[in-house]
Image (cartoon, rainbow, N blue to C red):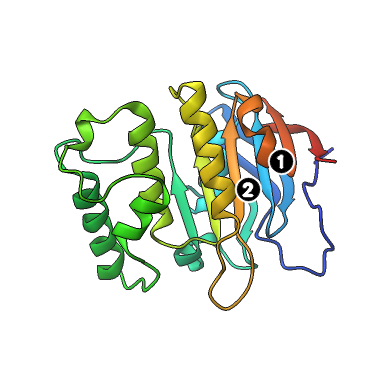
């Protein structure tokens, strides 16, 4: 049976919703008839081994891939209509190693503005928010893995998203760096939203102990299906 991650009244507009979604590649089903709702203002942690369908679920919510069957909505519209309100961070940092963090963020901010998005804030403020010095002249390629992850998080946070999608944000991080990442995400949830509303996080990981402090809902996936949904006490 499909499982719902809804933790609030259905009267509230869902941050994201999947209805009978399947994603099929040839003979392989990455998602199998998934139906779930992500309530605004919540942090949902999606668990599962490699190949469980976690990344595919995030990518359909982000509008990066189209479901084979079923429907996906973000704030009641197709994801590509709400891209200015969505930010997606893959487990690859998507940064240019030869550039500084400030140069990277300035470049990506310019791309957003050229695309007609007025949502981009200050690269300097985004770097300071994640604990990085915007005046650091060292190329990102010389950063530690923890610093690279923080720079990547700043890259997506500067778009001021209401829906933040994080694919394995704790990959290759030591315990201290992972805990710092959780603290940053907890702080992000308190940021005010222009025009009202709240911040919503969808986060995939196979390291549940790191994400537990910020998890409102935990979904467990296997073979492209949601097996279990648990709400934090």
SS category of the residue bearing label 1: strand
Q: Position of residue 122 (x, y in %)?
A: 32, 64
Give residue 33's mark.
Answer: 1
Q: Nearer the viewer, residue 104 or 229?
A: 104
Residue under pointer 2: 69
SS category of the residue bearing label 2: strand
Instruction: Point out the image quarter for the N terminus.
Output: top right
Alpha-carbon distance for marks 1 and 2?
8 Å
x 65%, y 67%: residue: 76
Position of residue 6 relative to residue 197, above or below, is above
Let me know if residue 95 appears in the view: yes
x 66%, y 47%: residue: 43
Name the mark nearer the viewer: 1 or 2. 1
x 80%, y 40%: residue: 232
Position of residue 199 relative to residue 60, above or below, is below
Q: Position of residue 12 (x, y in %)?
A: 77, 68
On screen, residue 83 versus residue 195, left or right, reads: left
């Amino acid at each position: 049976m499909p499982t719902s991650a809804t933790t609030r009244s259905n009267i509230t507009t869902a941050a994201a919703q999947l209805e009978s979604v399947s994603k099929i590649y040839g003979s392989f089903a990455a998602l199998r008839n998934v139906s779930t709702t992500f309530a605004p203002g919540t942090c949902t942690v999606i668990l599962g081994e490699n190949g469980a369908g976690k990344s595919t679920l995030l990518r359909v919510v982000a509008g990066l891939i189209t479901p084979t069957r079923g429907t996906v909505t973000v704030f009641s519209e197709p994801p590509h209509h709400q891209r200015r309100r969505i930010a997606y961070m893959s487990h690859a940092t998507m940064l240019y190693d030869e550039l500084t963090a400030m140069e990277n963020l300035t470049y990506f901010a310019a791309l957003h503005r050229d695309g007609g998005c007025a949502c981009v804030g200050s690269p300097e403020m985004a770097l300071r928010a994640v604990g990085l010095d915007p005046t650091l002249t060292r190329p990102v390629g010389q950063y530690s893995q923890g610093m690279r992850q923080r720079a990547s998080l700043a890259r997506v946070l500067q778009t001021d998203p209401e829906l933040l999608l994080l694919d394995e944000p704790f990959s290759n991080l030591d315990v201290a760096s992972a805990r710092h990442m959780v603290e940053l995400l907890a702080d992000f949830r308190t940021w005010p939203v222009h025009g009202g509303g709240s911040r919503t996080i969808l986060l995939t990981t196979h390291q549940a102990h790191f994400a537990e402090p910020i998890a409102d809902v935990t979904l467990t996936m296997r073979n492209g299906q949601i097996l279990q949904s648990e709400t934090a006490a």
